[in-house]
């Protein structure tokens, strides 16, 4: 695959992701797959309203049109 084709595919993918906000449960499921693939055994993902997301370093996603955040915490 040449660089131009790869660039076009990445641009189209990123544009479609920006245009369509994801529902929280769908995004949470995608994040869980990535965390499990990284080999993390014990963790918590929690969906909270924006005003309850106190620590920005724990935020791993934003959903429902930016009204909620997904918080990650490694257990143990």
Image (cartoon, helix red, strand yellow):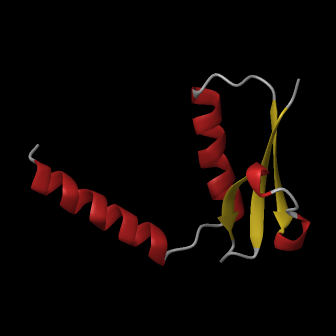
Quadrant (top left/top right/bottom left/bottom right) for the C terminus:
top right
Residue at 63%, 57% (x, y): give it. 26
Quadrant (top left/top right/bottom left/bottom right) for the N terminus:
top left
Relative horizontal placement of residue 58, taking residue 5 as reference (left or right): right
Relative horizontal placement of residue 63, taking residue 1 as reference (left or right): right
Residue at 38%, 64% (x, y): give it. 14
Question: Which percent across, then down, holds residue 68?
Answer: 77, 69
Question: Which percent across, then down, holds residue 25?
Answer: 70, 57
Determine the image quadrant of residue 48: bottom right
Q: Is residue 75 above or below residue 20?
A: above
Determine the image quadrant of residue 5: bottom left
Q: How many marks?
A: 0
Relative horizontal placement of residue 33, taking residue 52 as reference (left or right): left
Q: Is residue 57 above or below residue 21?
A: above
Q: Is residue 6 above or below residue 13?
A: above
Question: Which percent across, then down, holds residue 7?
Answer: 21, 57
Q: Nearer the viewer, residue 23 or 57?
A: 57
Residue at 19%, 52% (x, y): give it. 6
Residue at 57%, 28% (x, y): give it. 37
Question: Which percent across, then down, holds residue 21?
Answer: 57, 73
């Amino acid at each position: 695959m040449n660089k131009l084709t790869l660039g076009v595919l990445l641009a189209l993918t990123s544009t479609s992701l920006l245009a369509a906000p994801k529902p929280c449960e769908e995004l949470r499921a995608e994040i869980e797959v990535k965390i499990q693939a990284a080999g993390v055994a014990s963790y918590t993902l929690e969906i909270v309203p924006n005003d309850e997301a106190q620590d920005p370093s724990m935020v791993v996603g934003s959903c429902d049109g930016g009204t909620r955040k997904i918080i990650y915490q490694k257990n143990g």
